[in-house]
Image (cartoon, helix red, strand yellow):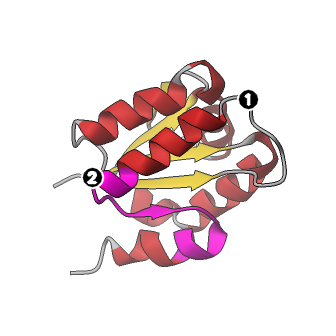
Amino acid sequence: MVLTFAFIAHDRKKLELRDCFARHHRLLSGCRIICTANTGKVIRDANPDVEISCVKSGPVGGDQQIGALIATEQIDALVFFPDPLTPMPHDVDVKALLRLAIVYNIPFALNVASADLLLPSLFRK
């Protein structure tokens, strides 16, 4: 079974997510990767060999698109690095995305430490 991961990062967290993805590149190379548009570009530029599907940018509906994939059980885990120190005009979408991850009981990581624990754990037998 191929695992499907969603990756999202706010602007000031994109480089942290890029570096985190790179650390887990070997594990993630055989997975389906879905990102919001700008996050996907940052990850793709650093990992050109990984196939990445992108939805819209978060503020224009990408968070909602990922939420819909969670609600239709097409996402196995979410790695989302929000920036807690910058006000977001689409904060409602962010809260809805996290609510769906909780409702549908999918594992999610919100920072580097939790992503470094979560990602390898999903590949243990």
| Above or below: residue 60 compared with residue 109 | above
The residue nearer to you, when weighing 102 against 11, is 102
Label 2 sits on residue: 104
Q: Is residue 51 left or right of residue 105?
A: right
* CA gap, disc 1 and disc 2: 25 Å
The residue nearer to you, when weighing 58 against 93, is 93
Task: State the image coordinates of residue 10 (x, y, percent, origin top left).
Answer: 71, 43
Q: Is residue 49 visible?
A: no
What residue sits 52% from the left and 27% below the top?
62
| Marks 1 and 2 in Cβ contact (< 8 Å) | no
Q: Is residue 34 magenta?
A: no
| Above or below: residue 2 compared with residue 55 | below
The residue nearer to you, when weighing 36 against 33, is 36
What residue sits 31% from the left and 72% below the top?
123
What residue sits 45% from the left and 61% below the top?
108
Bin the neighbour count of mark 2 within 10 Å (Cα to Cα): few under 14, some 14-19, many 20 and up. Answer: some
What residue sits 63% from the left and 63% below the top?
20
Q: Is residue 5 left or right of residue 12?
A: left
Find numbered disc 1 in the image and state the secondary structure of the residue it sits on: loop
Which quarter of the image is occupied by the N terminus?
A: bottom left
Q: Earlier in the sequence, mark 1 or mark 2?
A: 1
Task: State the image coordinates of residue 40 (x, y, percent, origin top left).
Answer: 58, 35
Start and end of the magenta stretch? 101-116
User: Hey, which quadrant is residue 65 in on the image?
Assistant: top left
Task: State the image coordinates of residue 29 (x, y, percent, origin top left).
Answer: 41, 54
| Above or below: residue 66 compared with residue 112 | above
Amino acid marked by disc 1: Pro
Residue 89 disc label: 1
